[in-house]
Amino acid sequence: MSRVTVSIDPHVHSEGSYDGHEPVELILEHAAEIGLDAVVITDHDVIRESKRAAEIAPEYGLIGIPGVEVSTAHGHLLAIGVERMPPRGESYAETVRWIRDAGGVAIVPHPFQRSRHGVRQRNIPTPGPADEATDDAAESEAPDSRVDADAPDSKAPDPDSKGPEPAPAPASAVAEVDAIEVFNAWLFTGYRNRRARRFAAEHGYPGVAASDAHYLQYVGRAFTELTVEGVDSVHEVTADDVLAAIRRGTTTVEGRRAPIRMAAKHYVGAAGRRSAYYARTGAARGARATKRTAVDGAVAAKVAALQSVHRTRRLLSWFA
């Protein structure tokens, strides 16, 4: 049987998100240039730009797939392949059910990282009971439980701020999630990624990798390769084919926290494409983008310095 492999970054934020920065046209252009076959715009609790990106993706030679990162009562959840916004604030289990009923796939992003509204292990619908004690102990002892380097996410509405967490529905009463994000390029250390990978393997979930990019140069820094059967060319692959491949688990994760094989294209290419894009779309917008880049660079440097100090203090505490 004929088959092809497609590369997809299923977790990217655009300027439609409160913490995103780039227009979808520029993201699609960059994704095509660095060799991706699809990129899913998953803005926080809004789907308009993602639907628009899916509509125009074929103009860039990409597979168009809409999606959204929805805030549930238990943490964030990726809804891939849906055309409507899932209800916000519902339990994790009920949101998974809604996504699957709508024909999409439900993917757990950056699981267990509470500083970025990742879901707790006990709230992920699984075939069997989760180990709550292990989850809570690891949460307090994890070496990367500090605020994540992806600072904008720390400003997201906290689903836990309205009182105690709703109790999770019994696993037997709900559909299970379709995949676990076992590699998120924004995690500061590899601890959460390793823990997510172990959890996915334990429960038989497909694993996906994603950049969780909020800036152009990070798009594709981590991505998922999918095997699609029954087609002779990537150009024949549809969004439904990609969703089916995720459900079947024919996935391979690619990436690392340092830039991967497309590093030169990421950084040099991104700078050139951004300049060209803003030259085409207007000097005023370009000037704003330049100023924003300078501010973002200063913030990133400050965050890096604080994290370095934090890690040094933690290391010294081991010998105290």
Image (tube, grey):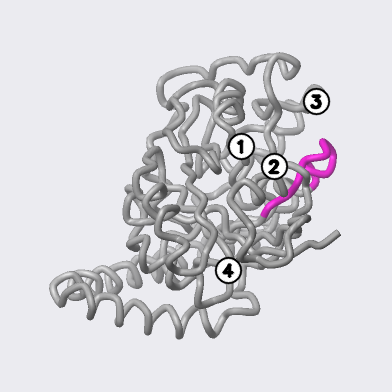
Q: Residue at x 52, y 50 (%)?
A: 65
Label 3 element class:
loop
> From mark 1 to mark 4, how far is it between C-alphas?
21 Å
Q: Position of residue 285 (x, y in %)?
A: 18, 70
Q: Residue at x 78, y 62 (%)?
A: 3
**Is 228 placed above or below 177 here?**
below
> From mark 1 to mark 3, how far is it between C-alphas?
15 Å
Q: Earlier in the sequence, mark 1 or mark 3?
A: 1
> From mark 4 to mark 2, how far is it between C-alphas?
20 Å
Assess disc 3: are there few (<14), some (14-19) or many (≥20) residues with their C-alpha within 10 Å of its C-alpha: some
Q: Residue 185 colored magenta?
A: no
Q: Are marks 2 and 1 in contact (CB under 8 Å)?
A: yes
Q: Residue at x 54, y 21 (%)?
A: 91
Question: Which residue is at the front of the view, 7 or 258?
Answer: 7
The circle on residue 127 is 3
**Displayed quadrant of residue 226:** bottom right
Q: Position of residue 171 (x, y in %)?
A: 73, 19
Please give the residue where the numbered disc 2 appears in the rendered image.
179
The residue mark sitting in front, 1 or 3, is 1
> From mark 3 to mark 4, how far is it between C-alphas?
33 Å
Q: Residue at x 75, y 27 (%)?
A: 126
Q: Which residues are magenta?
A: 198-208
> From mark 2 to mark 3, how far is it between C-alphas?
13 Å
Q: Residue 207 colored magenta?
A: yes
Q: Is residue 320 left or right of residue 109?
A: right
Q: Earlier in the sequence, mark 4 or mark 2?
A: 4
